[in-house]
Amino acid sequence: MVHPFTAASFNQFLGEHKLMASRCTQCKQTFLPPRAICPNCHSDQMEWVETSGKGTLAAFTSVYVGPTFMNAEGFDRNNPYATGIVELDEGVKISARLTGVDAKNPANIKIGTPMRVEFLDRGEGDAKQTFLAFTPAN
Amino acid sequence: MSNRKLGRGVAMVGAGMCKFGAFADKSSRDLFVEAFQEMRASVDQGFDPNVIENIYIGNFSSDLFEHQGHTAPIMADVVGLTPRPATRIEDACASGGVALRQGVMAIASGLYDVVLVGGTERMTKLPTAEVTDTLGAAGDTLFEIPAGFTFPGFYAAMASAYMHKYGMLPEHLMNVAKKNHDNGALNPKAQFGVTIRDWMQQRIQAALKKGKPAPTWKNESDFLHDDAANPMIAYPLRLFDCSPITDGAACVLLVAEERAREFTDTPIHIIGSGQASDAALHDRADLTALRAAHIAAQDAYAMAGVTARDIRIAEVHDCFTIAEIIATEDLGFFEPGTGFKMAEDGVTARDGAQPINTSGGLKSKGHPVGASGVGQAVEVWKQMRGQAGARQVNRDVPLALTHNVGGTGQTAVVHVYERK
């Protein structure tokens, strides 16, 4: 099956519990989120590569006032959630939800913490969506 | 650094804004009419609006905030300027600053001599959660927003990286809030026209009036650490680290330099303009600086033939307290990692060595996102002409700067102003 370098393909891979990046076959640079055109050499000769799913926490926050779709998941002022940016071992960074950290005590969350990928399946059947998350590796 | 020059000189000869705030009974067109009328009154020699040839309107999302698209011709119409070309500029919270740049370029190109630049946003009609969703649309809705990021969340994440890299504490951010509320208290157009001390007193009086036990904050710091009074929004950012949801409009009149004296003896020349773009936050090498803002500033300085040292006052994009600290570094006022210390030491205060946000900034003046960039130009107009009233800085201001950011720094636009 051909997967164009689109968000839809990326999300389909997430549904299969794979964190996929695109790699430029010309200059060998890796991109996450995937890109159709290399910003480095402007080649469109990309290939999919599965990432290690391992990295470290680069930035984070604990959100007390969220958007409506997170409120619908049960988060609010009294039940904040953590989100952040993880730098993968491949050198690329990605926004993701953070699990396994104490969102109510965000001062205890540490940048540089080794993280591993998790896939959060939400909904059933056609409504199923998979969200990217990371959790402390240890 | 680029070596671009304007094709010819551009001068600002009028500037005005409505009061920023929350107005249940005003649409963005009503706000724009007020801003236009104040701009009109500010033109020293007076002028006939018929001389305006072209209109740019900064607006982020009248579509979602008011269910009204196609905003520019509406704004042209309510001030009686159809059939002139009217164009809406959308670059998120930098819409106003980019509209200003379009106006500068339209005149510099030689195509027009007189251009109206406005900005409007009417945000308070929506409930807060939907405002959060709407502002979130300025982020990357495919790869950032599903992670649960909100706009406070993005800047909070930058703050976390900055704290980790430079040893800043959440308490340092409070200095920016205190300063900007002090300045905003002197600005009759500000949404929050009170200092944090006054705010505390108001809360205490309100409690006493209701017969409730009065809060016992010892000082501003005590108040700002109180989870009830200053709740966490996105760690480490609390309510008073965030700019408010605001209704507002602003506008300026730009003319070809050679025609400026028809309008005023004290024109403010726009001598530098820079703009840059960037990827989503996670896709940047450095999470503690905005590359686009740095490049926009370098380009604006180069065009103007000045350096950061020459700038007397600056209105910077303090959508969040951390944003002001990072801005003062991106603009070259301070070394990376030192901005929070400068805020702590009062360097950025109105009477400090490098005054930042004398208007109160977006933090206190309010942040009607599409109007904010134009509102910044209104403040430098007043300060450079000695018309800022109680908040007038205690020095001459021959050179000033505005810095307007869209999203998390996907857009940044910087202008340098000179009173010749």
Image (cartoon, coloured by chain):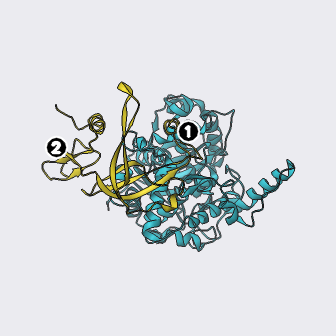
Instruction: Kindly identify which numbered label has been placed on residue B131.
Output: 1
Taking depth in this image into account, of B299 and B268 the one nearest to the observer is B299
Q: Which mark is residue B139?
A: none
Residue B211 image point, x, y percent? 87, 49
Q: Residue sitting at 67 percent across and 41 percent down?
A: B22
Q: Position of residue B178 (x, y in %)?
A: 65, 63
Look at the image and tell me in which quarter the C terminus of chain A lies. Answer: bottom left
Element class at badge 1: helix
Name the residue rendered at 65%, 70% in the picture.
B394
Residue type, numbered disc 1: Val
Picture colour for chain A:
yellow
Taking the view exactly as shown, the residue that stands out farthest to the front is: A138
Q: Residue furthest left?
A: A26
In front: B202, or B106? B202
Give me the C-alpha separation between circle 2 and circle 1: 39 Å
Is residue B58 in sight in this rendering? no
The residue under label 2 is A47
Q: Is residue B385 left or right of residue B99?
A: right
The number of discs equals 2
Looking at the rendering, which quadrant does residue A132 occupy?
top left
Element marked by disc 2 = strand
Quarter placement of the N terminus of chain A: top left
**Which of the 4 image quadrants contains residue B349?**
bottom right
| Residue A21 left/right relative to B298 | left
* Crowd around label 1: few <14 · some 14–19 · many ≥20 (10 Å): some
Where is residue B80? Give x, y as percent. 58, 31
Residue B44 as seen in the image, left or right of residue A42: right
Colour in which chain B is drawn:
cyan
Name the foreground residue: A42 vs B376.
A42
- Above or below: residue B294 compared with residue A16: below
